[in-house]
Amino acid sequence: MANRTAHRLAGTAFRALALLLLPALALAQAPPAVEDAVAEAEPGVPADPAGEPPVGPPAAGERARRDAELAAFADGLVRGVLARDRIPGMVVAVVDRDGSRLVQGYGFARLDPPLPADGERSLFRIGSVSKTFTYVLAMQLVEQGRIHLDDPIDLHLPPPLRVPDDGFAQPLRVRHLLTHTAGLEDIALGHLFDRDPAAALPLDEHLQRWRPRRVRAPATAVVYSNYGVALLGALVAHVSGQPFEALVEQRITGPLGMAHASFREPGVGQGRALDPALAAQIATGYRRVDGAYLAGEFEHIAHGAPAGSASASAADMARWMRLHLNDGMLDGVRLLSADTARRMREVLFANAEGVSGVAHGFLTEQVAGQFVYGHGGATLLFHTAMVLAPEQGVGVFVSANAAHARRPVREVARQLLLRLLPEPPPPPAAVALSPAELARYAGTYASNRRPYARVEKLLLGATGTIAVRAGEDGALRVDWGSETTRFLPTGPASFRSADDDQRLVFRTAADGEVTGFVADPGIAVMERLSPLGRPGTLALLLGLVAMVSALRLLAPLLRRRRGGPTHAQRRPGLGAVKALAVVSALCWLGFVVAAVVALLAMLAQGSALIYTYPSQSLLVALAFATAAAAATLLELLALVPVWGSRWAAWPKLRYTLAVLLGVATVLLMWHWNLVGMRV
């Protein structure tokens, strides 16, 4: 019960942080990857109208009728969701190749003073949807022949930005950054956002200071990486010879007339500040606390702009979607060749056959039997979804300004998209698996999108485990934190959600042992954990060490009160060893107490921890951890004189068992980076 309560408490603090690490919309299998596109079209140059796709608009009256029906449907859907989920505001855009079918704001962009959400002018933070602009900038350079997808990134980066090999011989290539297959660990605490605009480092400096380690060979797995896309943006900027924000304006937002879209932010220095007139239109993000809306701080992401700093209106995102639906051209302005625009939808890498893959940066999915692609975005206070269905030539954009809006945004985007798509085919029939076969997949899993070299590994790992259970009804239950999904078997190792289009495929080793699974949107692999790899095992060992340490300190006192033989009488000699045992016990108890205090302090901060990490209480706990580890290792050396002393056999054995328990705990603490102040 204690472990379960602790796990639940930790989950409250870190679940919001985990949302940052996932796109807000699961967007998937596409045609096979193709070679680099190289074309001569210059971005921003008007193109021959004959290059437009030969799709004519419906009759004006029919289009007006359909748009009115769509507006009525959206109005009821969105207003109902806002009221049900207590969300301040939402903006929506629905487009086809010929124009915008719906651009609308609902609720409020700001509550005090009141500012209604406006689809044309209100700027919402779009989070990782910003990455789609970075991908287009990269592909523009590919078209010009200035970079190639198979180029090692070191060819285009200054020495300070080059990523060390960390023991991997294969170079990182441009395509690895584009497809999230660079093999980088994922770190976020303490640097993903800034409250103070003056603290927002320049892009290059941020990339140097917060460089993650390479933890797997490139092109072995898709593992979503904010750092990788920020590095791709820096590469694009260095090749182009311009700051990233200026490059977006010159090559994308300016030519497309996206006047209410920018990667700049209010108050940021180094020429990156947003125009005050636009800044006044940025929506405020809110948390729902004790039945009231609490305005949040502005989340500065200027230091990692290519990965997530953009703010945009629904109207401008409508233009962005139409550009892609029209194969790289909008209103006579071509940003990409038609060939390149189509290839950006093609999957370059997938973690498993039959599960969503990553195209040229864009995420892909199957919805109602149709191929779609796009991206999702999340900050602490905003959630966004953008999805494009190229075969039907339609797109949907939804963004909301509430910390708890992830599921509502996905729901609105999905319902609007389903209204635009043909009637879906029946889902594949479930197959019957024996209880023994189903039980093969049960276990505890964790995403490989996580930190590896810092104590952040434990902080996020403690709440990131995923339980897979075999149900008596022949289906699997997957517990994703507070949510549970029921998956029906469609084959020996493949499953589909009973509620929607999500697919899940298990991975096995050569001997048939289940090693993990991949689920849509396919941006990470859920690895099966051994008992030693579970945070609960560490908690159990720490509990045992604390009990043993308390007994080592209290036993002599209790024995003296009962009038039994003194410690010196029972264990003659080795005074230094006895003193070391006391120091070790005090260090262990100090660490456990300090760790509990640090956990409670982090719980009190909630999602604000992403700004304040590492806290002073955590640093104190890690200092105690290092001291306890050092004392335990000294006790391990002391086993030699202990076993050569005149102590009785039982005290020797008891001392040895206590030391070995401490050593086992230290080894597990090293695995979780608790030793050595690796923050």
Image (spheres, helix red, strand yellow):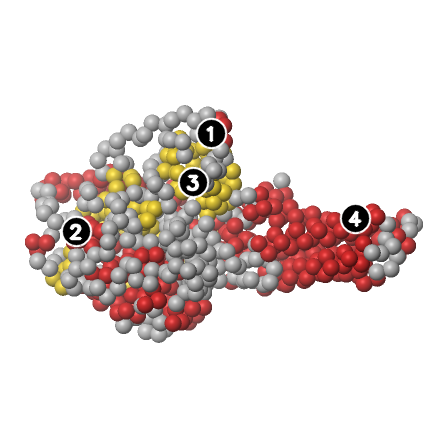
Secondary structure state at the residue bearing disc 1: helix
| Residue 228 at x, y percent in the picture | 37, 59
Q: CA distance from mark 2 to mark 4?
A: 77 Å
Cα distance between the residues tagged 3 and 4: 45 Å
Q: Mark 3 — residue? A: 507
Q: CA distance from mark 1 to mark 3?
A: 14 Å
In the picture, the quarter occupied by the N terminus is top right
Residue pointed to by mark 1:
437
From the image, state whether disc 2 or disc 4 is nearer to you: 4
Residue corresponding to mark 2: 326
Q: Is residue 524 visible?
A: yes
Mark identifier at residue 653? 4
- Residue type at mark 1 is Glu
Give the mark, 3 or 4, whose residue is nearer the N terminus: 3
Q: Nearer the viewer, residue 653 or 626?
A: 653
Outermost residue, bottom side: 270
Q: In the picture provided, is 3 more to the left or to the right than 566?
A: left
Q: Distance of mark 2 from mark 3, alpha carbons?
A: 38 Å
Query: Alpha-carbon distance for marks 1 and 2?
Result: 47 Å
Q: Is residue 598 left or right of residue 405?
A: right
Q: Earlier in the sequence, mark 2 or mark 3?
A: 2
The reply to whether discs 1 and 2 touch (Cβ–Cβ < 8 Å) is no
Name the amino acid, label 2: Asn
Residue, x 34% and y 58% (percent of image)?
A: 177
- The nearer-to-camera label among 1 and 2 is 1
Residue flagged by tag 3: what amino acid is it?
Arg
Q: CA distance from mark 4 to mark 1?
A: 45 Å
Q: Earlier in the sequence, mark 1 or mark 3?
A: 1
Position of residue 222 in the picture relative to residue 550 (left or right): left
Q: Closer to the camera, 384 or 210? A: 210
| Residues at discs 3 and 4 in contact (Cβ within 8 Å) | no
